[in-house]
Image (spheres, rainbow, N blue to C red):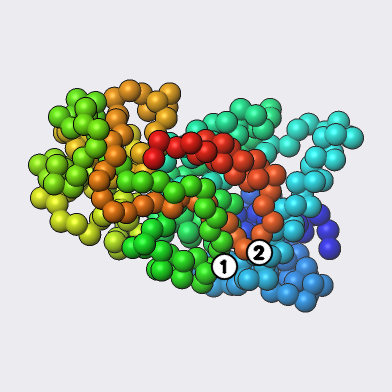
Amino acid sequence: MTLQQFRYIMTAATTGSLSEAAKQLYITQPTLTVAIQELEEELGITIFNRTNRGVSLSAEGEEFLGYVRQVMEQLNLIREQYLGDHPVKHQFCVSTQHYSFAVEAFVALLREYGGEEYDFRIRETQTYEIIADVAGLRSEIGVLYLNGFNEQVLRRTLQEKNLVFTRLFVARPHVFVGAGNPLATREAVTMEDLEPFPRLSYEQGEHHSFYFSEEIQSTRASRKDIMVSDRATLFNLLIGLDGYTICSGVINEKLNGRNIVAIPLLVDDYMEIGYIHHRNVVLSRFSQHYIGMLQKYTTTPNA
């Protein structure tokens, strides 16, 4: 068992392809294959499942990779501290639904812990992709919500993929509207108040099930529906078309400006917003710091 083999495992797990991993490691694919097979034989486990489409971590491999990442992270810290090595490029990835507080926490993480070099990534993406990213260890943390409508389906999906959900806070329903919307000055609105306006929602791709919707009350009919894939487009349409989107009500004015207003929605529902991580993987220090930032920026949400 060698540190070199550990680097091979981490790269293969990240790329999902032995040929691509070999290219990144500047070795031949047969050399990489043999090194992984030798480590599997030594440990008596199967680290990767092999298919025609590439490799994926087995359940044993997922657990093993968690320990490998810890070892490599601590080794890098020792080299920086005691050998004067050039600081290692820190790596971290989070996948999230479209929440400004998740971005705010990410910004704070970079400012405090990014160091001189880093490769940090944040993916605002579809609900199922968040789950797949964390299950496949492409992201350490995923941020999403549960409520009475989707909880049974999502919790079953999380359990099947060996993921754990931890609550951050519970938000009461709100809507985002542009500051120029006729409803913007209301203290609260009802679903009936929203009927004349376009409803904006995030598309969920091939997993376009109501259970994976990013918005609550998604099964309610609307005469005007618009699907978008990113937050910038959604905000532009809120302003340009006097649209609305149902949300948690948490918004960061510094990141999103004053053109978007959050208004309480009078409906019997809730959003339990939290983060997911892999049950068998010990969280890295950056994941732990990021969770701390999430807790900081959601302690007193506008919800």
Q: Report x, y in % for residue 176.
A: 28, 37
**Residue 124 visible in the displayed image:** yes
Of the pair 297 and 1, the residue shown nearer to us:
297
Q: Quadrant of the C terminus?
A: top left
Could you tell me if the residues under marks 1 and 2 are in contact, i.e. CB atoms within 8 Å? yes
Q: Earlier in the sequence, mark 1 or mark 2?
A: 1
Of the pair 89 and 153, the residue shown nearer to us:
153
Cα gap from disc 1 to disc 2, whole angstroms: 8 Å
Mark 2 falls on what kind of element?
loop
Residue at figure coordinates x 14%, y 42% from the top left: 193
Determine crowd level at label 2: few under 14, some 14-19, many 20+ residues with C-alpha closer than 10 A: some
Kindly identify which residue carries mark 2: 280
Amino acid carrying label 2: it is Asn
**Residue 16 visible in the displayed image:** no
Residue at figure coordinates x 68%, y 71% from the top left: 60
Kindly identify which residue carries mark 1: 162
Amino acid carrying label 1: it is Asn
Query: In the picture provided, is 6 more to the left or to the right than 278?
Result: right
